[in-house]
Amino acid sequence: MIDYPQLVDNLSIGTIVINRALEVVLWNRWMENHSHIPREQILGKVLTEEFPALKQKGIPWKVQTVFRLGNFAFFSQKLHQFLFEFENTKYFRPTLPYMQQSVTLVPLKGSDGTVEYVCISIFDVTDSVLYQQQLIESKRKVEELSKIDELTQINNRRHLMTRLNEELAVHERSGCVLSVILLDVDDFKNVNDLRGHICGDYVLRKLAGILTSQLRQYDILGRYGGEEFGIVVPGGGIDQALVVAERLRSKVEKFTFECDNNKFNITISLGLASTRGNLQATPQELFKMADEFLYRAKASGRNCVVAPDYKDNHISKDSILCSGSRDVLNKTSPISS
């Protein structure tokens, strides 16, 4: 003969049996342990009076539906998280303060086939929920790492180009101008040769921080490759991009780097490009143009900003050279459009 009360008491799930009046007629040991309510105190009591929050969760309606239709009913964790507010005592400093539960309502029929009682089974699914959260968080971190340059902790080149593609789509629809900046550390080889690659890495990390601090919230910074950084400047056109570029150039020029007890300064050269005159420009075309103007900045003495000069939405034969170090405006050699 099976000892059913003992069997129910040793189940690793909560088990409650109620009648049509929602009065408790069975309360197993699992429920005692987690609710801290002994069965002798709750048997014969109305369940929703002992746990008023169950009314808000729709227990009375679902229970009556089970009595009326004789079908199973369910409360999913994804929708409700929990039915009974039991503390999550499994973990030290748990991320989920309450036990996560899946609940099943089972009709218990008499000999005539009518539903006489409803059995409420409470399953602790906290482990599964936490595991799922960890999987989601791990996936998020992997996706984030795939976008970030490991050394500088800013966007890598692939994600920079992805963001630029997204911004180009927006600006093409709106007809607004978008600009890009390509900058390069002047004589970076000397930093590596004279001070070592550890200092070279330090310079790139520090430079990424300086650039980030000087950019607007909606500007997009990424490491383009080596000692080159790319910046997407949405809106404002080439004039606004010039202001941003000159601010960056000036800030870097004045900053003192410290590595291995040595203090030194570096400068950067910057080339600009814009969608003005070509709203359907591709990311590759924009960076190719910016690279051409960056080359002119290097050829013009470094530590300066070079940008195209537009006339009637077309690049003129000359380009503007903004030299912050000499604070003068010069002209570079002709460039084809």
Image: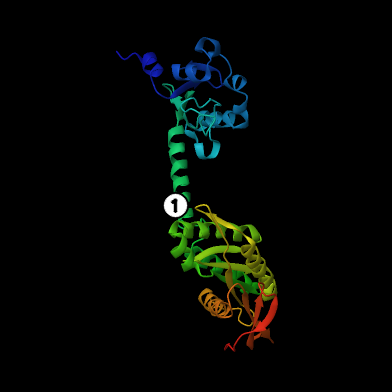
Between 241 and 95, the residue placed more toward the observer is 241
Q: Where, by quadrant of the figure, is residue 56 drawn?
A: top right
Q: Which quadrant holds the C terminus?
A: bottom right
- Picture colour scheme: rainbow
The answer to whether residue 95 is visible is yes
Q: Where 117 falls versus 328 (above or below)?
A: above
Q: Which quarter of the picture shows residue 250?
A: bottom right
User: Could you say whether the residue bearing mark 1 is in a helix, strand or loop?
Assistant: helix
Write down the residue under mark 1.
142
Tag 1: amino acid: Val
> Which of the 4 image quarters holds residue 306?
bottom right
| Residue sitting farthest toward the left | 1
Q: Position of residue 258 (x, y in %)?
A: 55, 55
Judged left or right of residue 195, residue 3 is left
The residue at the point 62 percent across, 20 percent down is 49
Residue 270 appears at what percent x and percent y? Answer: 59, 72
